[in-house]
Amino acid sequence: MNLSYKNNLGLYIHWPYCESKCPYCDFNSHKTESINEEDWIQAYVNQLHTMKEMLLKYNVKFNKLNTIFFGGGTPSLMPLKVIEKILNTANKLFDFEEKIEITLEANPGSYEREKFLDINQMGINRLSLGVQSLNDTNLNFLGRKHNYKDAIIALELAKRTFSNVSIDLIYGLKNQKIKEWEIELNSIIKNFQPNHISVYQLTIEEGTKFYSDYKKGLLKIIDEDLSADFYDNTNSLLENFDYKRYEVSNHAKNNFECSHNLNYWNSNNWIGIGPGAYSRLWSSNNNNKRFEIENYKSPKSWLSKNIHNAEFKKISFIDNSETNIDILIMGLRLSKGIKINKLLDKKIIKNEKIINLINEKIININTERIKVNKNYMIKLNAILQQIIN
Ligand SMILES: C[S@@+](CC[C@H](N)C(=O)[O-])C[C@H]1O[C@@H](n2cnc3c(N)ncnc32)[C@H](O)[C@@H]1O
Ligand code: SF4
C-alpha cells in the first residue's frame, strides 16, 4: 500500500465561543463569556507541546505542517494574542511548509471585520466567511446576528484583505423558492467572486432549537424531491461559473480547494486542539495503525484539565475495520473518489452490490479509483449503507 498520502499534517484549533447560539447549530459552540486570555494561551500551548511528544512517541511520519484551521464556534472572536501565540508555537514545534494554508472562520459582524487586517498580517492567508445568506428574512430565520449589509461589507473587506476567501451558505429553507436562491447565489458570485464556496442544505440536527421546533410541528422542512432539485440546480449554477464541485457540498475555483479539509477526506494525519477537538494519526509503531486523541468537550473542563499540563480525555487505537470504513466514507465524499489502494482491506465492499451499482452507472470503478457518479452524490449515505460489508 502506498503510504505517502499519510505524510501530510494538519492542525485544527477549536474556539468554542460565539456571540449567541444559532438555533440550527449542533457544533460545540457556546454563548461567549469573559475569559482569561493567559489561561487559554497556556492551555493551547500545553496541548501543542504534548502533541509533539505524542507524534514522536507513536512514531507518526509527517513532513511539516501543511495546513492550519481555526474553527468553531466563532474563531474571529478569539483575542489576537491567542491566535498569535498558537501560530508562533506551532511554527516552532512543527515547522510550517512554505505554502502552508492557514484558515480562520469568521462571522461578518462589525467587531470581527475590524480584525481582518491584523489576522492577515499574523499569517492567516485564507478567510472562511459565514455569510449564510444575503437575504435578511432568511438570516433572521437562521437566528444570525448579522444582516445583509454586514455581509456585503465583510465580503468586500475580506476580498481586499485576503487572497483566498471562502464563504459558507445555507439553503433549502422551507419558504425559499429555488429561483430566489439562484438569484442570491448568482449575485454573490458576480459581485464578490469568492475563491471557494461551501453550500449546505439546512439540516435539522438533534439537540438544537430547530429540532425541538420540528418535533413540535412548528418548523417544516422541504421534501426529498425539492431538496434534490435545490442540490442539482445549485451545482449546475456553480459549475457554470467555473466552480468545480470537489466534495459533496464544496466548490472551488481551480487550485482553491480547501487543503485542510482534504486532509480529513483523504484520511491523512491531523492534530486537533481545543475543547472537543480530536486528532487522527497513523502510528508507524503498530503496523501503521490509526489512533485517535480526544479532548474534553466542555470549554470549562477542557481549560481546567489543560492549564497546568495537557490532559486528553482519551487516546485509543482504532480497529482496522473501523479505519477502513472511515477511509471509504470520507473518500467517497470527494468527486474524484478514492484510490483503491488506500483501503486496508478491499473486502469492506460488498461485491454483488457494487456490480449492480456499476451497471446502474451510480458508481464508477477502474483499476485505480472508485467514485460515486456526479448525479448520485446526494444519495451518498444510502449508497454507503448498501456497499459496506
Ligand atoms: C462551525 S460553523 C462556521 C463558523 C461560524 N461560526 C459561522 O457560523 O459562520 C460551520 C458551517 O456549518 C454550516 N452549518 C452548521 N449547522 C448547519 C445546519 N444545521 N445545516 C446546514 N448548515 C449548517 C454553516 O454554514 C456554518 O457556516
Ligand atoms: S453556526 Fe456558527 S455562529 Fe452559529 S452557533 Fe454555530 S458555530 Fe456559532
Image (cartoon, rainbow, N blue to C red):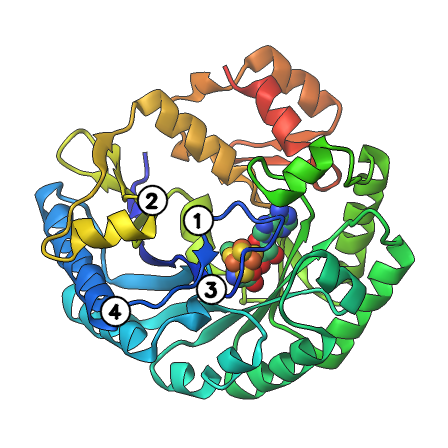
Along the line of sight, which residue is nearer the eye, 128 or 79?
Answer: 79
Q: Which residue is mark 1?
A: 28
Spatial CA span between label 1 and label 3: 10 Å
* Residue drawn 78% across the image and 49% down it: 172
Spatial CA span between label 4 and label 1: 20 Å
Q: Nearer the viewer, mark 4 or mark 2?
A: 4
Image location of residue 76, percent across then percent down: 45, 72
* Residue drawn 23% across the image and 74% down it: 85
* Mark 3 CB within 8 Å of ligand 1: yes
Q: Answer above or below: position of 123 versus 48.
A: below
Q: For this view, does 329 lie left or right of residue 284? A: right
Q: Which mark is residue 36?
A: 4
Mark 3 or 4 closer to N-term? 4
Which amino acid type corresponds to the residue marked 3 in the rendered image? Thr
Image location of residue 237, percent across then percent down: 80, 60
Mark 1 or 2 closer to N-term? 1
Mark 3 or 2 closer to N-term? 3
Q: Nearer the viewer, mark 4 or mark 1?
A: 4
Q: Which mark is residue 74?
A: 3
Mark 4 or 1 closer to N-term? 1
Q: Count residues near mark 1 (Cα–Cα under 10 Å), then give few for <14, some for 14-19, many for 20+.
A: some
Q: Answer above or below: position of 143 versus 295.
A: below
* Residue drawn 42% across the image and 58% down it: 260
Q: For this view, does 359 lie left or right of residue 299? A: right
Spatial CA span between label 3 and label 4: 17 Å
Q: Quadrant of residue 38?
A: bottom left
Dots 1, 2 in contact, CB < 8 A: yes
Which amino acid type corresponds to the residue marked 1 in the rendered image? Asn
Q: Which residue is mark 2?
A: 297
Where on the image, by quarter, is ligand 2? Answer: bottom right
Q: For this view, does 89 lie left or right of residue 335? A: left
